[in-house]
Every structure is written in structure tokens, then in C-alpha cells.
Amino acid sequence: MRKLLLLLLLSVPLVALAGKGEIRFVETTVDLKGDGSAVVLYQVQWQVTSGELHGFYFQGNGRLKPGMAVGQAAAVDSRGKRYRLDIRNLGNGKWDILLADGQGVPRGQTVTFNLPFRTDFHAAGYLGPTTAEDGRELVFFNWAPVQWDEAANQDHYTLKILTPYRLPDEQVNPRSVVDTERLILTEPWMNEEYLIDYQRGPNNRLLLVLHKNRPGNRFQMRVQFYMPADWFRLVAGADAAGLADMANQEQQGGSDTSSTLLLILGLAVIAAFFGVVRGKQRSMVKAREGLDEIRWENLDWTPPKLILSEFRKPGKICKDLTPLEAAFYLEIPFKLIVSAMLNSMALEGFVEIESRSPLKVKVLRRPDPHQLDEYERLFYESLSDDGELSQAELEALMNMAVENVQRKAWDADIEATQNWYRRQVSEYLKTAAAGGLADPARRTEANDWYYWYHNRHPYYRRGWNYDDDPARHATDIPVAVDHIIHGPLNTDIAMELNVCHDACHSACHSACHSACHSACHSACHSACVSGGSH
């Protein structure tokens, strides 16, 4: 079964602050894959202290590049009300996490956010090969989840890491296996800083759990431990060790010259932005990295468990998607969709391709905007001003599509809806086949969708019969897709929040959380923290 995850590619202004909150708890789960990639899930609960809370800012992921999974992002409040999330990329690693459709949670309530994304720890340098003093080949994991502001009263911070290792026997005690076979080596300070447990995770995988009670504001839950190298199949090319060494030098201060330069740059930036950021909190937390003496230990304890459930309704079909929205739902790549729109505009004589790389078009005649849908109007307007497509224009188009699909199909059965639209395309093609399809060899799902989209368009007059490749401009579409996921997340982590989550946690969890947006982050390599409730 395939499940579609539509991801946001956005860049929109900040919304006015409307409410205030503090975090009751933060729980982070990392589903670590053998190639160093991972699915990360943040579960964050806010207590609304004033006004109406609409969301918060999420940042401080360091070198990780999150691919946000909007389709599985959600929230639930203490009344049991569920919310979809509007996730907006503000650039420079900063995201605005909002309750969809302008909704808010009033004072006195709690709301728990479910925020998953895909990323790569090996490529970022937080995971990589190393060798122990006895010659044993290991893989290090040296990372900290984001720090949170507005968290002075936070009850706990929990980090769970689902390793690639599968336990040999379903009856064996995971802690005994780890201890006997020396599977995980931790730095001495970790045993002093955290409660540590080893558990049986989903699909019999070894789960490392680290827990900190009453962590305090802007707590950095840094971990550093080592796993057997044969758990991983790291691909050469991402020089993780080199990145880690570079980061270590940066964080230890580097040379006197570089430290002085960074200090001057930092002071200059602070001075330049003082009028703008006055009154805002700043985070200049140093992340320490380095290899201390390896020590083995674990503490037996049982951490709180999060209860999860399912959002989507089995069998429910969303039948009111437009053909372009259906393309997103059928998991047709964004660049191909844009290329297909351009192909139709050129086929109808509205534009002419002047150059392929860089992609540039010439407007020949203006279409009747009332005969186009909202995506086609926005697409034409993006082309007509300068003959080019910018990153911001493409992000606006993606933003519109994802928000509309979310609004229409947020609780639909993904597989049932996908199959329904495939049948619509298939039935249309059967009717059209009476006249003959020019080139059946080009019968891909994307091309069949395009045949359905273009030929049944009420405004387009010139038919398309597999005459050319509608995807031929895709490679020239100037869009960065690092934070777009077109397919399902490959993860063993359960993503959906249960309405009783708040009640289950109220007895044993309370926390606080938020953000500082330091003006000198880029100049001084400081660690910005998440939060900024609004």
C-alpha cells in the first residue's frame, strides 16, 4: 500500500503574534536507517498561557536538511479536537508551524503537535565511521535535537533512537543483549546526564531511550554514542567524519584569528539588527563535540509511552480534486506537473520556448484568465512578467496546491482516492481509444494523466495524442526539492496522535517551549532554538 505525503515548499511572511504558550514536554523519535538517513518525529505539547495559540517557530536543526512530511503532521488539543498543520518554510532553516485554516487553541488548553520529517544524519556529519582504541570498527552518533525557548517549566525531554539492529530473539531482554554483546558504547557524561534504557522497538528493532526530567529552558540534549559498523552501509561521498571534525573545530573556537573574526562579525550583526530584534531572546549555545573516554553503562527505568491512532477514514474518497491536484495526489513529481502546464501553454500558442537552459519563454498572446483555473492563472502570471520561473513563484504554486489538497482530502483514504483517480484517467482513455492513440509506447501513468488533463480541459482546443514528451522541460524547472517528499515515509514510527494523548500525559508530563531567533546566527554559528509561540 502506498501512502502519499504531500510536502510544503513555502516562503511566506510571519503572522502577527496572537497567543502565548509554554511547553509541557518534548519527545523526539529518530528512526535511524542503515544508510544514515532517518525519519525524525517531534512531539511537542504546549500549554496556552494567554490569547489564542496558533503555532510556533521551529528551527535550530544545524546541518540537517528536513524534508517536512505535511501529510502526517497534525495536532490535537486537550478537548480532543484534531488539527491539520500548515507548515511554512521561512528560509534559513526556519519553519512556521501553524494550525491549519487560521485555527487557534484558547488559554487554559494544551495542544500537542506531531511534526515528522525525513533527513540524513550521515550527509550532515552527525553520524559516521570511527575506530575504537582496540581496533573495533564503529559508527558514531553525535547529535542534539533542537533546543526550546519558553521552556523554563518543561517536565521532560525524551529522545528515542530506533537503531537498524534487529534483536535476535523476541523473548530476550534488550538490555541484556546490549550489555552482553557491547552493542552500544556511550560517553561517560551521558550516563551522568540522562536516564538511559534499551527497549524492544517496532519490528523487533533495538530502541535506545534517553530521558531528562526538568531539563530547563534551552536545554541541549546532546548525545554521543557508538554502534557496531556492521549495522550500517554508509555510502562514500558524504564525508561525515570530515564534517564532524570541522564542526568540532568551529565549536572549540578554532584559531585565535577565526575566533576574533567571528566575534567582530557577531558584534557587527547584533549592532545592525539591534533595532529590529530588540526585546527578542537570543541563543548562543555552544554544542560541544569531541571524543572522550568510552564507557559502558545503562540505567533500568520505564519512560512514559505515547498513545497513537489513525487520522484517515478507511474507504473515504475525495472526488473534488482538480486534475492538477489529482496529479499531486497520484505522486507525479512537481517538476513534471509544471513542465506539463508549460507544454499545454505552448501547445495552445500562449507562449513560446526561447531557451531550454536556462528556461525562458516568450509570451505570444494572453489567454482568457476566466477560462483557466487558479493554478494555471498563477503559472501564466509567473511567466508573463519576465518570461522566467523563479524559486519563489514555484514555491507559491506548490503552496497553493498543497494547502488546497490538504483542505479537501486531509482525512481521505489515500489508496482509495488514488485508485479512484486512476480509474477516471483509464475510463477517459478507453473512450479516446476509439479514435486511436498515436503512440501507445508512451503510455506511462504521468503521460496518461497528462492526456486526461489536457484533452478534457474546457478551454484548450488543440488536442495532444502522445505527440511529444510533456516532461521534457522538467529538468530545466528551477526548483529546489530538498524539503519536498513525493512518496511515503519509510518508517516504523507511528505518526498519528490520539485524542487521549493529553489526558495520558497530564498525570506525569508537563513542559514548556519556544524560540529565540538570534540575529547573529549565521555569522557566529550559534544554535538558534525553536519556539516563539504565536
Image (spheres, rainbow, N blue to C red):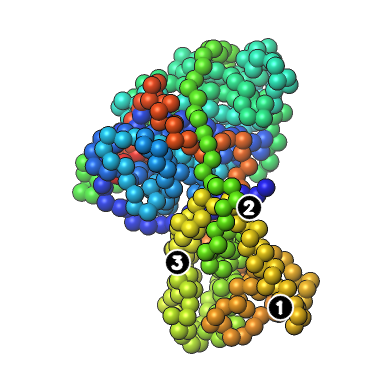
Q: Amino acid at mark 1?
A: Ala
For marks 2 and 3, give the one nearer the viewer: 2
Would you place residue 22 above or below residue 215 in this image?
A: below
Quadrant occupied by the C terminus:
top left
Residue 378: where, in percent of width, then height? 44, 72
Please state which of residues 297 and 405 is positioned toward the viewer in this rendering.
405
* Residue 452 marker: none
Please state which of residues 276 and 351 is positioned toward the viewer in this rendering.
351
User: Distance of mark 1 from mark 3, alpha carbons?
Assistant: 35 Å
Please state which of residues 82 and 364 is positioned toward the viewer in this rendering.
82
Secondary element type, mark 1: helix
User: Distance of mark 2 from mark 3, alpha carbons?
Assistant: 30 Å
Query: How many C-alpha atoms fall within 10 Å of the one at disc 1: few (<14), some, or many (≥20)?
Result: some
N-terminal of the two: label 1 or label 3?
3
Report the residue marked by disc 1: 432
At 46% from the left edge and 39% from the top edge, which residue is drawn? 114
* Residue 393 marker: 3
Would residue 257 be visible to someone looking at this image?
no
Q: Left or right of 333: which side holds 167? A: right
Would residue 295 be visible to someone looking at this image?
yes
Please state which of residues 374 and 272 is positioned toward the viewer in this rendering.
374
Q: Amino acid at mark 2?
A: Glu
Query: How many C-alpha atoms fall within 10 Å of the one at disc 3: few (<14), some, or many (≥20)?
Result: some
Residue 15: where, in percent of width, then height? 30, 52
Q: Amino acid at mark 3?
A: Glu
Q: Give the number of callouts.
A: 3
* Residue 415 marker: 2
